[in-house]
Amino acid sequence: MAFHPRTTFGHPSQQSLRNSLAINVGGHHQFVCLLSPTLTNQESKQRRKVVKMARFSYRSSAELSSIFGIFRSMCNTAIRVAITEKPSNRFKLIELAYPHLKEYGMHTNYILTACKVAHAVCTNKNAKRVPYIKKAFLELGNQTYQLNHLLLRIPATPRHYIFLVLQGSDYHLSLLNNPSHRLGSVIITGSSVNIAVTKEVEMTEPGGFIGVDINERNTTVSTTEGYSHRHEEPSDVVEIKQRYQAITTRISRATSKDNRMRQMLLAKYGKRERDRTIQRIHRMTKKIVDYALENKLGIKMEKLTGIGKLYRRGNGQGPAFRGRMNKWVFGETQRQLNYKASWDGVQCWLVNPRGTSSNCLCGSRVAQRVDRKVYCPKCERTWDRDDLASKRIMACAVPQARPFT
């Protein structure tokens, strides 16, 4: 069992981002921090509504598989209506698509969620082709299903229900049975049931900061209290990715004439790689957040959005270097840090990355030396490159920071 979170980045003034919960039903990013719209600006700095998706395993059935197929057809029908009629909003789409979707004979909630999915994919500005739903899933609102301990009841057709027995640990049960937690929507895929759990937390006013410098082979942290530590888990992640890249290369060569077998094996080993990667990042980020929570520190990280553009084809790097950089898991590390910190009431900021490892604390330009060492001619001091970067991130002025939302 695992929790797969998602974060939404942005400036705190973006109210639309604060109040949206976006879930990729085919992927694993399933956590969003939301600020309550009923709070004042001063109160919203102290209270925050957070959502965590609890992932359960279960045994599927033939009846549920047929519902997957029907719901997928409903979503694609709603997409065709949206493309043809071009409704101005989701509610207009429901009005236009309702007569078509009612013919499927499913529970009314599936009509509403099918229109919700169709409107989301049709308004995606990054889509390069006509959207089409391929993956099997179901989405239900919190008023549609019933959960009794680990027994989930979902509607199929009107007055007909399907019961699913979930497999969860004590930690899953502690989330579901906590009276301060509220259950939200549920997303069911062919292998898992994902239930949203929400709560309101009091955001801790930081008494100091911890700077986090995320590198390819290490993550270095420094605090205002003088504590500094280098986490080596990213080095294990790099080795895992290199090992599985060699495995997938052999699989592709051995199954060049059998596409079905190649896809099956690549999916199998790809899942193993993701699970082992996420587990190591989980252990590292948990240590960082626990330290920040214990010492009442705020977390600062570099805003690395768009850094992948530096490693595109045609930028002068070789394919091996570009492939290595594109496997860098800085996004996963920041995602886990943010959702774990928000769940515990620890505040996170993104700071400007310019000059974090090329300038000294005094502001002077440093000279690069071997073994990731840098030298400041003004201070006449030699720094570890990663330690210097984490200290500069930690000491970054708050007006330059952009908090997570």
Image: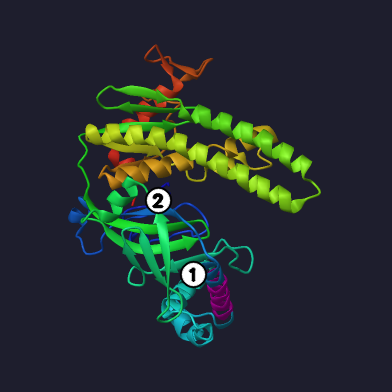
User: Would you name the residue on which mark 2 appears?
Assistant: 7
Residue 346, image quadrant: top left
Say if residue 210 shows up in the picture.
Answer: yes
| Most foreground residue, 164 or 393 | 164
| Crowding near the residue tagged with mark 1, few <14, some 14–19, many ≥20 C-alpha atoms within 10 Å | some
The residue positioned 46% from the left and 75% from the top of the image is 156
Residue 79, image quadrant: bottom right
Percent of width and height locating residue 25: 49, 60
Say if residue 45 shows up in the picture.
Answer: no
Residue furthest to the right in view is 257
Percent of width and height locating residue 51: 33, 55
The residue positioned 48% from the left and 67% from the top of the image is 138
Please report the bounds of the magenta region as a residue range: 68-83
Residue 117, numbered circle: 1
Percent of width and height locating residue 90: 44, 76
Residue 76 counted in the magenta span: yes
Measure the C-alpha gap from mark 1 to mark 2: 20 Å
Left or right of 229: which side holds 216? Answer: right
The kind of secondary structure element at disc 2 is loop
Amino acid type, label 1? Val
Amino acid type, label 2? Thr
